[in-house]
Image: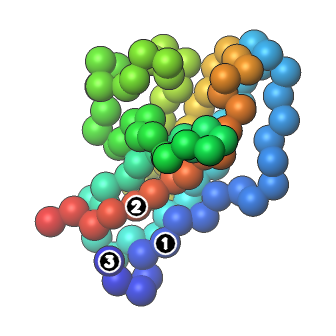
Amino acid sequence: MTRADSVTQPSHPIVLKQSESTIIQCKYEAANTAPGLFWYIQDPNQAPQLILNGYSQTEDIPPRFRNRFSASPNKTEKTFHLNITAAVLSDSATYFCALSPTL
């Protein structure tokens, strides 16, 4: 990664009621035009777990998130927002947007 590579996401908590939907924003800067983009979830006292990446197919997404979590890279706007629909209590966690260079 070069010094210019970075991700920015909100630092404030997002509060939802069960069954509500939200978008967790992620903006990125990358020297590479096709960086690897990832979303991770970290449950309390657990290691981060991969939710999806910029190339995930539905069957690649863990069952816990399948059909409710999605993200599509927007290379023009340099965003990779995480869409969560029909929130459930177990979605309460810390979410990380991550970037890695692609060869």
* Residue pointed to by mark 3: 1
CA neighbours of label 3 inside 10 A, class few (<14), some (14 to 19), many (20+): few
In the rendered view, tell whether residue 86 sits above or below residue 9: above
Task: Inspect the image, locate mark 1, and give the three-letter code of the amino acid beneath it.
Answer: Ser
Task: Inspect the image, locate mark 2, and give the three-letter code of the amino acid beneath it.
Answer: Leu
Residue 28, given in percent of the width and then of the height, sits at 50, 64
- Marks 2/1 in contact by CB < 8 Å: the verdict is yes
* Residue 81 visible in the current orientation: no
In the rendered view, tell whether residue 93 sits above or below residue 89: below
Q: CA distance from mark 2 to mark 1?
A: 7 Å
Residue at (15% x, 65% y) in the render: 103
In the rendered view, tell whether residue 91 sits above or below residue 49: above
Residue at (62% x, 44% y) in the render: 45
* Residue 37 visible in the current orientation: yes
User: Which image quadrant is residue 82 in?
Assistant: top right
* Residue pointed to by mark 1: 6
- Marks 3/2 in contact by CB < 8 Å: the verdict is yes
CA neighbours of label 2 inside 10 A, class few (<14), some (14 to 19), many (20+): many
- Secondary structure under the numbered disc 3 in the rendered image: loop
Q: Residue furthest front?
A: 45
In front: 21, or 11? 11
Q: Which numbered disc, 2 or 1, marks the residue that appears first in the sequence?
A: 1
Residue 21, given in percent of the width and then of the height, sits at 72, 23
* Residue pointed to by mark 2: 99
Q: Which numbered disc, 3 or 2, marks the residue that appears first in the sequence?
A: 3
- Secondary structure under the numbered disc 2 in the rendered image: strand
Q: Which numbered disc, 1 or 3, marks the residue that appears first in the sequence?
A: 3
